[in-house]
Image (tube, rainbow, N blue to C red):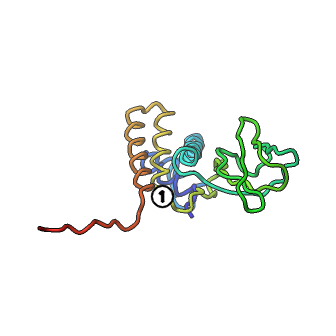
Amino acid sequence: MTKIKEIVTLAAFYLQEEEILGLPQMQDDFQGVPTDDEALDKLLRCVNLVRSEIASDYYPLLTSENINCIDGRVDPVSLQKRIIDVKRITQNGKAVQFKVYPDTVKTAAGEVEIEYSYLPEDEGLDGDAGFSDKIAARVIAYGAAAEYCLITGLFEEAVIWEKRFKDSLFVSQRKKSEIRVKPRKWL
């Protein structure tokens, strides 16, 4: 599992923000470098923003939970995670119809299992990135570097890091199975 601290370390290295690596929170790995708590906070927020962007736009995080819908309504805030999209609702193992509204999900009354995509919770340095190594720390660090450059006014650098982020994300989403080519027939 990729840790947030690993991503922050990579992003700080890419950005040449070595003062971040000398903070007490980062001292396990680096020592003797001046500290800058504000820069670390910004970079940590950028990492969490990128994690949310990946989960909502590129690589959905899925979960399911059982809920008792007395009146056939599911309140999104009653779910354990911050919902993005409902994928499927089943009752007794059979799919049931549902309709998603901004403040509720209407479905069959009774005990149902709802499968949905969600936004990851913001994590601290010791937290987990949440993508079970499907998305490499390097990819998230590229995105965090782009966000950090954007909020600090380094717009040209932001464009470069954003391109690296999107390209790496595209590569990580590609199907990685065996590619077969039909044999050619010669006449």
- Write the residue at 56% across / 56% down: 5
Q: In front here: 144 or 19? A: 144
Q: Which residue is mark 1?
A: 136
Q: Is residue 39 visible?
A: yes
185 with respect to 95 (left or right):
left
- Within-10-Å neighbours for mark 1: few <14, some 14–19, many 20+: some
Placement of the N terminus among the 4 image quadrants: bottom right
Q: Position of residue 44 (x, y in %)?
A: 58, 46
Q: Position of residue 164 (x, y in %)?
A: 39, 46
- Write the residue at 23% across / 69% down: 183
- Write the residue at 70% across / 40% down: 100
Q: Position of residue 117 (x, y in %)?
A: 64, 50
Q: In front here: 88 or 82? A: 88
- Write the residue at 43% across / 33% down: 154
90 with respect to 45 (left or right):
right
Q: Position of residue 38 (x, y in %)?
A: 59, 40
Note whether 52 is above or below 112 in the view shown. Answer: above
Q: Secondary structure at mark 1?
A: loop
Q: In front here: 90 or 63? A: 90
Q: Amino acid at mark 1?
A: Ala
Q: Is residue 36 visible?
A: no
